[in-house]
Amino acid sequence: MDTTVTAIGDVVVAALEDAGYMRSTIGQYRKSIKWLGVLAEDQYGQYTLTLGKKLASMTISPRSGKYSAQRHFDYGRLVCLFDSYILTGTVDLSMRPRAFQKEKPNSPEFSGLLDSWSQDLEQRGLAPATQTCFGGLACEYLLFLESDGVSSWDAADGASVLGFLESLRDRWAATSMWSAVSSFRPFLKFTQRTDLLDALALARTKRHHGIIPMIDSEVERQVVDACQHGSVSARDAAITLLCLSTGLRACDIHSLQLTDIHWREGTIGLVQQKTGNPLTLPLLPLVLTKLAQYVLEDRPDSDAHEVFLRLKAPHVALSDHASIYVIVNKVFHSSGMEDVRVGTRSLRYNAASKLLQAGTALPTISAILGHAHSDSTNVYLSVDTERLRSCILPLPGARL
């Protein structure tokens, strides 16, 4: 087997062309192959797994001097293709979750600890998204220790915990730091390091319960019109209408199976990714129509069981629930709402708020949204300003 960057690059490009990738995408791969070839000059053009790891680590843009998500994805994806060819003799074009592209610790002790943590998460039966989040933060902390010259778990101290949290502030919003701390704490409990837990408590992060406003009725009307009259693809229209009308979580829309749609009854029945609870919801006629149009006319031929697939090759399931956010925003922009930024969370709030305004009982809203606990629905009370005004008590001696 010829293992030069040039030879493997030709094989990779041929595989991309056979799979129907767009010219622009293949052109981007060629640019990454070119830079990989420059790195390989010191070793006579030969590709090795170590060389691939070096390219994947080059995530800092030379122009801005800052982290580049585009470089991270382009180089990481190319390295996956090169590595698959070196290890198996074939180019594996299957899509991988983002977590697979993350660097792993070099220390055998850290690698073993991370594997034990991953096994514990799986044995506890946590949702896949939760496992990815908990495991990802643990991995990032261990990598942070290694970057600071620490390769033994016993050498980790409280200062490293606070330093790690500070490093997250470049990528995590201030309002999300509570979530980061909450997702990191279980790992430290697993390791039984009470000193590190005490250091984590010093962060004193607070949970933010921001009031998410409802979407203006005119904005919603324009979005529905764009979905109804073909301004966007049937796939994107079906996803956006599902979000608007049902308030489904992004992870549930992403993992929706063809067998979950009950066409004759006009319903969908699924097991929620977050809670593991079964949920059956009726579909509005327009939503059902767009789903049927997509499945019967626009959905690419594929063996995948998921309803929603990539429009571009490879035609596999969407990479993760973040893809739903991108699609929904694209639909809003296509409908002329370029200044409106939304996601499935805001659309979930919007659906719940409309049900509340219509006089729907909280337990019913809780059942529709698939909450594990009915108390979770209380947060939506904050947007029902009319009913909140009726709860105001007059001040003693005040003139009305």
Image (cartoon, rainbow, N blue to C red):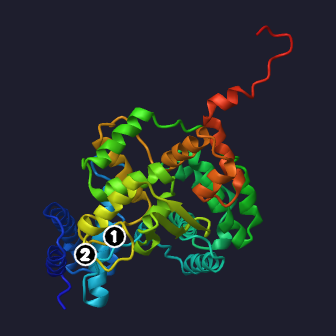
CA gap, disc 2 to disc 1? 37 Å
Residue 27, percent from left and from top: 15, 63
* Res 130 → quadrant: bottom right
Residue displayed at 32% across by 72% down: 316
168 and 119: which is toward the camera: 119
CB under 8 Å between callouts 2 and 1? no
Please name whichever residue, 94 or 139, is drawn nearer the observer in this view of the structure. Answer: 94
Direction from residue 247 to residue 117 in the image, left or right: right
For residue 319, say whether it is visible: yes
Q: Amino acid at mark 1?
A: Lys
Rendered position, 229 above or below 158: above
Q: Amino acid at mark 2?
A: Asp
- Residue 215: percent from left, percent from top: 47, 37
Q: Dividing the image into 4 quarters, which one contains the C terminus? A: top right
SS state under label 2? loop
* Residue 265 vertical position relative to residue 394 in the rendered view, above or below: below
Q: Label 1's element? A: helix
Percent position of residue 334, x then y: 28, 43
Residue beneath the point at 80% across and 18% down: 394
Q: Which residue is mark 2?
A: 301
Q: Is residue 88 above or below residue 294?
A: below
Q: Nearer the viewer, residue 198 or 40?
A: 198
- Residue at 64% across, 72% down: 153
Neighbor class of circle 1 (other Cα within 10 Å; few <14, some 14-19, many 20+) is: some
User: Residue 212: horizontal and vertical position, in percent?
Assistant: 55, 39
- Judge whether 147 appears above or below 246 on screen: below
Q: Which residue is mark 1?
A: 54
